[in-house]
């Protein structure tokens, strides 16, 4: 049955299968989210990347004039591209998870990270003022 399927299968199928297998080998989970690194204090740092893939395949049969061959010759090609761009690092501590971006404004990100702590401090100052009055 496999020999019959191979005879009826179009050559472009083989071309596409080979290209897709190559893409599958190039891109795996460790490409998207890299291997984690653990520091001596127990902090885990995970690099994060954005992966984009593109794939194209095409082909056609052409006829040779004067040929009585029933199977027409096939010409085809395929191509693929993979782009990996670092996004940042995920830092996991005991009770804290932070995303440190590769690009962007680190000061603004730090302010956003500290906002809950700042609000808590303001609330405690306000409560102390109310109790004194």
Image: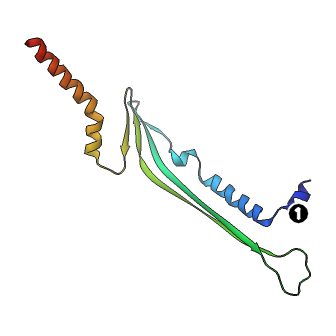
In this image, 129 relative to 69: left or right? left
Q: How many marks?
A: 1
Residue corresponding to mark 1:
7
Residue 31, x across and y down, in percent? 54, 49
10 or 26, which lies in front?
10
* Residue 132 figure quarter: top left
| Rendered location of residue 19, percent (x, y) | 68, 60
* x and y, in percent, of residue 10 in the image: 81, 64
Q: Quadrant of the C terminus?
A: top left
The residue sitting at the left extreme is 133
| In this picture, residue 92 sits left or right of residue 66 | left
Above or below: residue 18 compared with residue 101: below
- Pick whichever, 60 or 48, lies toward us: 60
Q: In the rendered view, tell whether residue 89 sits above or below residue 10.
A: above
Question: Could you tell me which secondary element the residue under label 1 belongs to?
Answer: helix
- The location of residue 73, given as percent across then percent down, is 82, 76
Q: Residue at x 41, y 43 (%)?
A: 89
Taking the spot 36% from the left edge, 46% from the top edge, the residue there is 101
> Which residue occupies 32% across, 50% down?
104
Near mark 1 (Cα within 10 A), the count class, few <14, some 14-19 or many ≥20, is few
């Amino acid at each position: 049955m496999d020999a019959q399927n191979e005879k009826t299968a179009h050559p472009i199928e083989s071309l596409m299968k080979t290209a897709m297998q190559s893409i599958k080998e190039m891109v795996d989970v460790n490409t998207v989210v890299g291997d984690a690194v653990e520091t001596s204090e127990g902090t885990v740092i995970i690099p994060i990347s954005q992966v984009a893939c593109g794939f194209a395949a095409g082909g056609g049969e052409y006829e040779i004039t004067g040929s009585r061959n029933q199977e027409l010759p096939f010409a085809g090609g395929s191509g693929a591209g993979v782009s990996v761009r670092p996004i940042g690092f995920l830092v996991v501590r005991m009770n804290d998870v932070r995303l440190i971006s590769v690009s962007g404004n680190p000061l603004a990100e730090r302010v956003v990270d500290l906002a809950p702590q700042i609000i808590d401090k303001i609330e405690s100052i306000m409560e102390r003022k109310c109790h004194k009055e």
